[in-house]
Amino acid sequence: MTVTLATDELFVAEKFGPTVQGEGPSIGRRAVFIRLMNCNLTCRNCDTPYTWDSARFDLDAEGTVASISDLLAWATVQPVDLVVITGGEPLMQQRRLIALVQGLADAGLQVEIETNGTIAPAADLLASVTRFNVSPKLSSFGAGMPSSKRIKGRVLGDFAASGRAVFKFVVSSTADLDEVTGLVADHDLAPVYVMPEGRTAEEITRRLAEIADPAIERGFHLTTRLHVLTWGDQRGR
Ligand SMILES: Nc1nc2[nH]cc(C(=O)O)c2c(=O)[nH]1
Ligand code: SF4
Ligand SMILES: [Mg+2]
Protein backbone atom coordinates (compact mmCIF):
# COMPACT_ATOMS: atom_id res chain seq x y z
CA MET A 1 0.00 0.00 0.00
CA THR A 2 1.45 3.32 -0.99
CA VAL A 3 -1.42 5.59 0.05
CA THR A 4 -0.84 7.88 3.00
CA LEU A 5 -3.80 8.63 5.21
CA ALA A 6 -4.59 11.66 7.36
CA THR A 7 -5.93 11.03 10.86
CA ASP A 8 -9.48 11.73 9.64
CA GLU A 9 -9.36 9.36 6.67
CA LEU A 10 -9.92 5.63 6.14
CA PHE A 11 -8.81 3.32 3.34
CA VAL A 12 -12.13 1.91 2.11
CA ALA A 13 -12.82 -1.00 -0.26
CA GLU A 14 -16.53 -0.34 -0.71
CA LYS A 15 -19.63 0.92 0.98
CA PHE A 16 -22.99 -0.55 0.14
CA GLY A 17 -26.60 -0.95 1.12
CA PRO A 18 -29.22 -0.81 2.27
CA THR A 19 -29.05 -4.58 2.38
CA VAL A 20 -29.41 -6.88 5.39
CA GLN A 21 -26.84 -8.12 7.88
CA GLY A 22 -26.37 -11.59 6.42
CA GLU A 23 -24.54 -13.26 9.31
CA GLY A 24 -24.68 -13.63 13.07
CA PRO A 25 -27.10 -12.48 15.76
CA SER A 26 -28.48 -9.56 13.72
CA ILE A 27 -29.15 -11.70 10.65
CA GLY A 28 -31.92 -10.25 8.53
CA ARG A 29 -31.68 -6.73 9.94
CA ARG A 30 -31.58 -3.92 7.43
CA ALA A 31 -28.12 -2.40 7.40
CA VAL A 32 -25.52 -0.54 5.40
CA PHE A 33 -21.92 -1.72 5.15
CA ILE A 34 -18.53 -0.05 5.09
CA ARG A 35 -15.76 -2.45 4.05
CA LEU A 36 -12.22 -1.39 4.89
CA MET A 37 -9.03 -2.35 3.05
CA ASN A 38 -6.13 -4.44 4.43
CA CYS A 39 -5.88 -7.54 6.55
CA ASN A 40 -3.22 -8.99 8.85
CA LEU A 41 -4.13 -12.59 7.90
CA THR A 42 -4.01 -14.46 4.58
CA CYS A 43 -6.82 -17.01 4.74
CA ARG A 44 -7.03 -19.45 1.85
CA ASN A 45 -10.84 -19.33 1.89
CA CYS A 46 -11.08 -15.53 2.15
CA ASP A 47 -14.03 -14.15 0.14
CA THR A 48 -12.65 -10.58 0.06
CA PRO A 49 -9.04 -11.00 -1.17
CA TYR A 50 -9.35 -7.71 -3.06
CA THR A 51 -8.97 -5.97 0.32
CA TRP A 52 -5.49 -7.37 1.04
CA ASP A 53 -3.95 -9.72 -1.53
CA SER A 54 -1.41 -7.62 -3.43
CA ALA A 55 -0.27 -10.70 -5.40
CA ARG A 56 -3.69 -10.89 -7.09
CA PHE A 57 -5.00 -7.32 -6.85
CA ASP A 58 -3.78 -3.76 -7.21
CA LEU A 59 -4.71 -2.58 -3.73
CA ASP A 60 -4.20 1.10 -4.49
CA ALA A 61 -6.74 0.74 -7.31
CA GLU A 62 -9.14 -1.38 -5.23
CA GLY A 63 -9.18 1.05 -2.31
CA THR A 64 -10.46 4.60 -1.98
CA VAL A 65 -9.33 7.13 0.57
CA ALA A 66 -12.50 8.40 2.25
CA SER A 67 -12.82 11.12 4.84
CA ILE A 68 -14.69 10.31 8.01
CA SER A 69 -17.00 13.26 7.43
CA ASP A 70 -17.98 11.90 4.00
CA LEU A 71 -18.59 8.43 5.42
CA LEU A 72 -20.71 9.91 8.21
CA ALA A 73 -22.66 12.03 5.74
CA TRP A 74 -23.33 8.92 3.63
CA ALA A 75 -24.31 6.61 6.50
CA THR A 76 -26.49 9.01 8.45
CA VAL A 77 -28.88 9.65 5.55
CA GLN A 78 -29.50 5.94 4.97
CA PRO A 79 -32.94 4.67 5.99
CA VAL A 80 -31.51 2.08 8.41
CA ASP A 81 -30.37 2.08 12.03
CA LEU A 82 -27.47 -0.38 11.69
CA VAL A 83 -24.04 0.15 10.15
CA VAL A 84 -21.74 -2.87 9.76
CA ILE A 85 -18.03 -2.17 9.45
CA THR A 86 -16.09 -5.04 7.93
CA GLY A 87 -13.04 -5.79 5.82
CA GLY A 88 -10.43 -7.03 5.43
CA GLU A 89 -9.59 -6.51 9.09
CA PRO A 90 -11.12 -3.22 10.23
CA LEU A 91 -9.12 -3.05 13.46
CA MET A 92 -5.95 -2.50 11.41
CA GLN A 93 -7.29 1.06 11.06
CA GLN A 94 -8.85 1.28 14.50
CA ARG A 95 -7.15 4.50 15.64
CA ARG A 96 -8.76 6.35 12.75
CA LEU A 97 -11.96 4.29 13.00
CA ILE A 98 -12.83 5.57 16.48
CA ALA A 99 -14.10 8.95 15.25
CA LEU A 100 -16.31 7.27 12.65
CA VAL A 101 -17.87 4.89 15.15
CA GLN A 102 -18.37 7.69 17.69
CA GLY A 103 -20.02 9.84 15.01
CA LEU A 104 -22.35 7.02 13.98
CA ALA A 105 -23.27 6.30 17.60
CA ASP A 106 -23.88 10.02 18.25
CA ALA A 107 -26.27 10.00 15.28
CA GLY A 108 -28.26 7.23 16.99
CA LEU A 109 -27.01 4.39 14.78
CA GLN A 110 -26.00 0.97 16.00
CA VAL A 111 -22.58 -0.19 14.84
CA GLU A 112 -21.34 -3.75 14.45
CA ILE A 113 -17.71 -4.50 13.61
CA GLU A 114 -16.72 -7.77 11.96
CA THR A 115 -13.21 -8.77 13.09
CA ASN A 116 -10.89 -11.78 13.00
CA GLY A 117 -10.13 -11.39 16.72
CA THR A 118 -6.36 -10.98 16.49
CA ILE A 119 -6.11 -7.25 17.30
CA ALA A 120 -7.22 -5.94 20.70
CA PRO A 121 -9.85 -3.18 20.48
CA ALA A 122 -8.96 0.21 21.96
CA ALA A 123 -11.11 1.28 24.93
CA ASP A 124 -12.53 4.25 22.98
CA LEU A 125 -13.67 1.98 20.20
CA LEU A 126 -15.15 -0.57 22.59
CA ALA A 127 -17.14 2.20 24.27
CA SER A 128 -18.98 3.23 21.08
CA VAL A 129 -19.49 -0.08 19.29
CA THR A 130 -22.76 -1.92 19.72
CA ARG A 131 -21.17 -5.32 19.09
CA PHE A 132 -18.08 -7.01 17.72
CA ASN A 133 -18.74 -10.11 15.63
CA VAL A 134 -15.46 -11.91 16.26
CA SER A 135 -14.52 -14.69 13.79
CA PRO A 136 -11.37 -16.53 14.87
CA LYS A 137 -10.02 -18.51 11.92
CA LEU A 138 -9.87 -22.31 12.16
CA SER A 139 -7.04 -24.37 10.66
CA SER A 140 -9.26 -25.54 7.76
CA PHE A 141 -10.13 -21.98 6.81
CA GLY A 142 -6.71 -20.46 7.16
CA ALA A 143 -4.76 -23.44 5.87
CA GLY A 144 -1.07 -22.72 5.89
CA MET A 145 -1.22 -20.07 8.59
CA PRO A 146 0.21 -21.14 11.96
CA SER A 147 -2.27 -21.08 14.83
CA SER A 148 -0.05 -18.52 16.61
CA LYS A 149 -0.97 -16.07 13.85
CA ARG A 150 -4.70 -16.90 13.69
CA ILE A 151 -5.43 -17.28 17.41
CA LYS A 152 -4.44 -14.63 19.96
CA GLY A 153 -5.60 -15.91 23.33
CA ARG A 154 -5.22 -12.60 25.16
CA VAL A 155 -7.20 -10.73 22.53
CA LEU A 156 -9.99 -13.31 22.48
CA GLY A 157 -10.11 -13.13 26.27
CA ASP A 158 -10.43 -9.33 26.12
CA PHE A 159 -13.30 -9.59 23.64
CA ALA A 160 -15.06 -12.23 25.74
CA ALA A 161 -14.71 -10.11 28.88
CA SER A 162 -15.97 -6.96 27.11
CA GLY A 163 -19.59 -8.08 27.09
CA ARG A 164 -19.81 -6.62 23.58
CA ALA A 165 -18.64 -9.56 21.51
CA VAL A 166 -20.11 -12.66 19.97
CA PHE A 167 -17.91 -15.34 18.45
CA LYS A 168 -18.74 -16.61 14.97
CA PHE A 169 -16.80 -19.58 13.63
CA VAL A 170 -16.87 -20.41 9.94
CA VAL A 171 -16.88 -24.21 9.72
CA SER A 172 -16.41 -26.45 6.69
CA SER A 173 -17.36 -29.79 8.25
CA THR A 174 -18.37 -31.48 11.48
CA ALA A 175 -14.68 -32.18 12.17
CA ASP A 176 -14.14 -28.42 12.59
CA LEU A 177 -16.55 -28.37 15.53
CA ASP A 178 -14.01 -30.14 17.76
CA GLU A 179 -11.56 -27.31 17.12
CA VAL A 180 -14.30 -24.79 18.00
CA THR A 181 -15.04 -26.67 21.24
CA GLY A 182 -11.34 -26.51 22.17
CA LEU A 183 -11.05 -22.77 21.49
CA VAL A 184 -14.25 -22.01 23.37
CA ALA A 185 -13.01 -23.93 26.41
CA ASP A 186 -9.45 -22.54 26.29
CA HIS A 187 -10.54 -18.91 26.06
CA ASP A 188 -13.93 -18.95 27.78
CA LEU A 189 -15.75 -17.68 24.70
CA ALA A 190 -19.51 -16.91 24.72
CA PRO A 191 -21.90 -16.62 23.03
CA VAL A 192 -20.76 -18.83 20.15
CA TYR A 193 -22.29 -19.07 16.68
CA VAL A 194 -21.22 -21.44 13.96
CA MET A 195 -21.71 -20.60 10.31
CA PRO A 196 -21.24 -22.85 7.27
CA GLU A 197 -18.42 -21.91 4.91
CA GLY A 198 -19.52 -21.37 1.32
CA ARG A 199 -19.83 -18.98 -1.60
CA THR A 200 -22.97 -20.53 -3.11
CA ALA A 201 -26.43 -21.29 -1.74
CA GLU A 202 -25.84 -24.99 -2.52
CA GLU A 203 -22.61 -25.19 -0.48
CA ILE A 204 -24.08 -23.29 2.44
CA THR A 205 -27.27 -25.33 2.55
CA ARG A 206 -25.38 -28.63 2.36
CA ARG A 207 -22.86 -27.70 5.07
CA LEU A 208 -25.50 -26.21 7.35
CA ALA A 209 -27.46 -29.48 7.20
CA GLU A 210 -24.25 -31.38 8.09
CA ILE A 211 -23.23 -29.23 11.06
CA ALA A 212 -26.59 -28.19 12.53
CA ASP A 213 -27.33 -31.07 14.92
CA PRO A 214 -23.75 -31.59 16.15
CA ALA A 215 -23.41 -27.82 16.69
CA ILE A 216 -26.64 -27.63 18.71
CA GLU A 217 -25.53 -30.65 20.76
CA ARG A 218 -22.28 -28.88 21.60
CA GLY A 219 -24.20 -25.81 22.82
CA PHE A 220 -23.53 -23.50 19.86
CA HIS A 221 -25.92 -21.17 18.08
CA LEU A 222 -26.29 -21.34 14.31
CA THR A 223 -26.24 -18.73 11.62
CA THR A 224 -26.37 -19.02 7.87
CA ARG A 225 -25.11 -16.52 5.27
CA LEU A 226 -28.41 -14.95 4.26
CA HIS A 227 -26.96 -12.59 1.65
CA VAL A 228 -25.25 -15.48 -0.16
CA LEU A 229 -28.44 -17.58 -0.08
CA THR A 230 -30.31 -14.59 -1.50
CA TRP A 231 -27.91 -13.00 -3.99
CA GLY A 232 -25.06 -15.50 -4.45
CA ASP A 233 -21.46 -14.32 -4.32
CA GLN A 234 -22.28 -10.82 -5.60
CA ARG A 235 -20.03 -8.06 -4.37
CA GLY A 236 -21.76 -5.20 -2.59
CA ARG A 237 -24.63 -7.23 -1.14
N1 LIG B 1 -25.11 -8.74 3.64
C1 LIG B 1 -23.89 -8.99 4.13
N2 LIG B 1 -23.77 -9.35 5.43
C2 LIG B 1 -22.51 -9.54 5.90
N3 LIG B 1 -22.14 -9.83 7.17
C3 LIG B 1 -20.80 -9.89 7.24
C4 LIG B 1 -20.27 -9.61 5.98
C5 LIG B 1 -18.82 -9.52 5.73
O1 LIG B 1 -18.40 -9.55 4.58
O2 LIG B 1 -18.07 -9.37 6.69
C6 LIG B 1 -21.36 -9.40 5.11
C7 LIG B 1 -21.51 -9.06 3.73
O3 LIG B 1 -20.58 -8.97 2.92
N4 LIG B 1 -22.80 -8.85 3.31
S1 SF4 C 1 -9.18 -12.56 8.28
FE1 SF4 C 1 -11.00 -12.28 6.99
S2 SF4 C 1 -10.44 -10.66 5.50
FE2 SF4 C 1 -8.53 -11.41 6.46
S3 SF4 C 1 -7.79 -12.96 5.05
FE3 SF4 C 1 -8.99 -14.02 6.61
S4 SF4 C 1 -11.08 -14.14 5.77
FE4 SF4 C 1 -9.96 -12.61 4.56
MG1 LIG D 1 -18.83 -10.99 3.01
Image: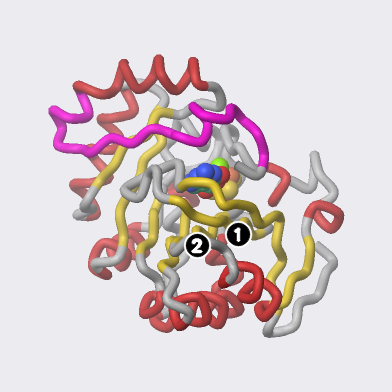
Q: Are marks 2 and 1 in contact (CB under 8 Å)?
A: yes
Q: Amino acid at mark 2?
A: Val
The residue that mark 1 highlights is 34
x%, y% of residue 194?
32, 36
Q: Secondary structure at mark 1?
A: strand
Image quadrant occupied by the C terminus: top right
Looking at the image, residue 117 lies above or below residue 125: above
Please name the residue shown 13% across and 28% down the image.
Answer: 217
Label placed on residue 83? 2
Name the foreground residue: 47 vs 143.
Answer: 47
Quadrant of the image occupied by residue 38: bottom right
Q: Looking at mark 1, is its residue's CB closer than 8 Å to ligand 1? A: no
Q: Residues within 10 Å of mark 1 (few under 14, many from 20)?
A: many
- Magenta segment includes 231: yes
Residue numbers of the magenta segment: 214-235
x%, y% of residue 149?
49, 51
Looking at the image, residue 143 lies above or below residue 208: below
Left or right: 19 in relation to 174: right
Left or right: 3 in relation to 83: right
Please name the residue shown 51% across and 36% down the image.
Answer: 227
